């Protein structure tokens, strides 16, 4: 019960790492606000958490809107009394729509989409979490951000990697800024995962071809694709008191990719 009686907001909780984290955090005693832009997906996560004996509520949240992050945090306080952990997990992949991932293939709309969700959404989540932690005034509070190995090394699309690089730097600088307040800020950086990430909604939770599985497996020295549970377990560690003297850390969950 690493998060016993902790109150948590998880963005992007309707799928992937967000859904895995909602289930794992709740199993470890947390009370979870499952926030996502897609109401049906968030509601399904809540159902799974409750069916497993956990505590969760659903909140529709578009991380491009600071007001939505405020509403998610307010829901957490209204339901559970306070905010203890903010997991800024929501993000999107490069939208190809028949285009390539190269910088010259992407336009202003692609730039605005990735920056507004992957970068600004994390900024809003961090900002509002820090405001709430200050209001609570007890020198407690944890922020975990989902970045990516693509923000650490040159892989993937330029726009996507640059937004995740921004999340990494935000994490490090904010960690130092709020350390005196007893607030910890860390990030997890997954590598190749087999999730709905970047897939059309109508195929979001469908099967993945054996060829794709093999390709993703081969990316990692350990020979296995990263799972949402892998990233969620790393976030659990960083959110828990097991990491009470860890802040400003960018933790790769990459099967050895960045060490190769």
Image: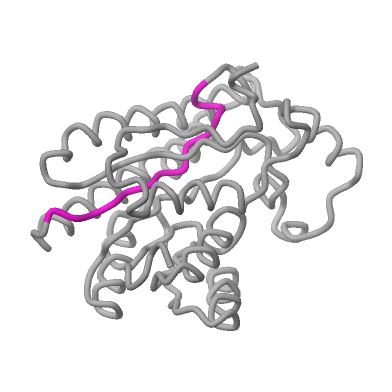
Q: Which residues are magenta?
A: 139-152
Q: Is residue 162 left or right of residue 197?
A: left
Q: Is residue 8 left or right of residue 109?
A: left
- Report if residue 148 lies within the magenta region: yes
Expressed as whole percent of the image width and height from the top left, the position of residue 124 reads 30, 48
- Residue nearest the observer in this picture, 228 or 256: 256
Q: Write down the quadrant of residue 243 in the picture.
A: top left
- Report if residue 213 lies within the magenta region: no
- Residue nearest the observer in this picture, 106 or 16: 16
- What residue is at 18 percent from the left and 59 percent from the top? 132
Is residue 80 shown above or below 170?
below
Expressed as whole percent of the image width and height from the top left, the position of residue 228 reads 62, 51
Expressed as whole percent of the image width and height from the top left, the position of residue 230 reads 60, 48
Q: Is residue 213 left or right of residue 204?
A: right
- Residue nearest the observer in this picture, 117 or 99: 117
- What residue is at 45 percent from the left and 45 percent from the top? 117
- What residue is at 28 percent from the left and 77 percent from the top? 80
Q: Is residue 70 left or right of residue 159?
A: left
- What residue is at 51 percent from the left and 70 percent from the top? 27
Q: Write down the quadrant of residue 222 in the picture.
A: top right
């Amino acid at each position: 019960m690493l998060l016993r009686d902790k109150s948590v907001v998880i963005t992007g909780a309707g799928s992937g790492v967000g859904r895995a984290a909602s289930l794992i955090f709740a199993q470890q005693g947390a009370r979870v606000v499952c926030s996502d832009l897609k109401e049906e997906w968030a509601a399904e996560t809540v159902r799974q958490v409750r069916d497993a004996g956990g505590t969760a509520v659903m909140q529709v949240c578009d991380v491009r809107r600071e007001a939505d992050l405020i509403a998610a945090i307010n829901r957490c306080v209204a339901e559970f009394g306070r905010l203890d952990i903010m997991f800024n997990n929501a993000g999107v992949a490069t939208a190809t729509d028949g285009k390539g991932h190269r910088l010259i293939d992407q336009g202003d709309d692609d730039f605005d989409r990735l920056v507004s969700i992957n970068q600004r959404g994390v900024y809003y989540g961090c900002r509002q979490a820090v405001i709430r932690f200050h209001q609570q005034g007890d020198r407690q509070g944890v922020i975990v951000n989902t970045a990516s190995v693509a923000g650490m090394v040159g892989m993937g699309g330029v726009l996507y990697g640059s937004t995740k690089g921004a999340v990494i730097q935000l994490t490090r600088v904010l960690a130092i800024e709020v350390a005196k307040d007893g607030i910890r800020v860390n990030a997890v950086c997954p590598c190749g995962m087999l999730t709905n990430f970047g897939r059309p909604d109508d195929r979001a939770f469908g099967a993945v071809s054996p060829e794709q599985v093999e390709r993703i497996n081969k990316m990692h020295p350990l020979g296995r694709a990263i799972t949402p549970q892998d990233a969620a377990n790393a976030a659990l560690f960083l959110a828990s008191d097991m990491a009470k003297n860890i802040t400003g850390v960018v933790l790769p969950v990459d099967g050895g990719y960045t060490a190769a």
